[in-house]
């Protein structure tokens, strides 16, 4: 059975690059956190990847947005594998402080290796 990944990413170029690197998996994209939550209600995935930067509501921080998303994901899918893939080093530090696995977008090979390792099981 093919392993499924939900990737929350609003930038087309980054999604296309990652889809080429993860071509052996069923990669589905949600362009924002709200759409991702709709998908998660209906479908299960082996891995959930989220960008750390989104168009935000006024006064909302990126850390608050993805942490809120993560909390909702775990409530819906308690055994979910989640990783943050971000270009923001501060967001990565915040994720790690909350014991959430995170990678900088510059660490592409390390990130892809991690994804492949998670999906072996």
Image (cartoon, rainbow, N blue to C red):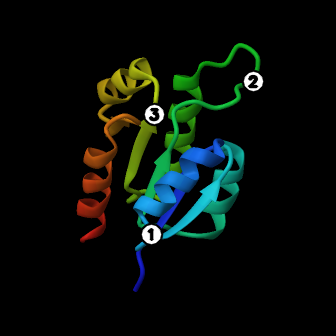
Kindly identify which numbered label has been placed on residue 120: none
Q: Are marks 2 and 3 in contact (CB under 8 Å)?
A: no
Q: For residue 76, say whether it is visible.
A: no
Residue at image point 34% right, 44% down = 108
Q: Are marks 1 and 2 in contact (CB under 8 Å)?
A: no
Q: Quadrant of the N terminus?
A: bottom left
Residue to which mark 2 is pinned: 57
Instruction: Report x, y in % for residue 14.
Output: 55, 45
- Distance from the alpha carbon under mark 1 to that under mark 2: 33 Å
Q: Secondary structure at mark 3?
A: strand
Q: Is residue 9 above or below residue 30?
A: above
Residue at image point 41% right, 36% down = 105
Q: Is residue 22 above or below residue 60?
A: below
Q: Give whichever of discs 3 and 1 has the lower sequence position.
A: 1
Instruction: Report x, y in % for residue 68.
Output: 56, 34
- Distance from the alpha carbon under mark 3 to that under mark 1: 20 Å
Q: Residue furthest right?
A: 58
Q: Secondary structure at mark 1?
A: loop
**Is the residue marked by circle 3 packed among few (<14), some (14-19), or many (20+) residues within 10 Å?**
many
Kindly identify which numbered label has been placed on residue 23: 1
Q: Is residue 62 above or below residue 108?
A: above
Q: Is residue 46 left or right of residue 42?
A: left
Kindly identify which numbered label has been placed on residue 86: 3
Instruction: Report x, y in % for residue 47.
Output: 42, 60
Q: Are marks 3 and 1 in contact (CB under 8 Å)?
A: no
Q: Give whichever of discs 1 and 2 has the lower sequence position.
A: 1
Q: For residue 64, say whether it is visible.
A: yes
């Amino acid at each position: 059975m093919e392993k499924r990944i939900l990737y929350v990413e609003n930038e087309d170029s980054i999604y296309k690059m990652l889809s080429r690197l993860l071509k052996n998996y069923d990669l589905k994209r949600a362009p924002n956190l709200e759409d991702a939550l709709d998908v998660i209600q209906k479908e299960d995935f082996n891995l959930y990847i989220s960008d750390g930067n989104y168009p935000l509501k006024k006064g909302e921080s990126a850390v608050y947005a993805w942490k809120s998303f993560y909390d909702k994901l775990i409530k819906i899918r308690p055994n979910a594998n989640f990783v943050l893939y971000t270009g923001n080093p501060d967001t990565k530090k915040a994720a790690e402080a909350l014991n959430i696995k995170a990678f900088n977008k510059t660490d592409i090979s390390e990130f892809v290796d991690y994804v492949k390792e998670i999906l072996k099981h």
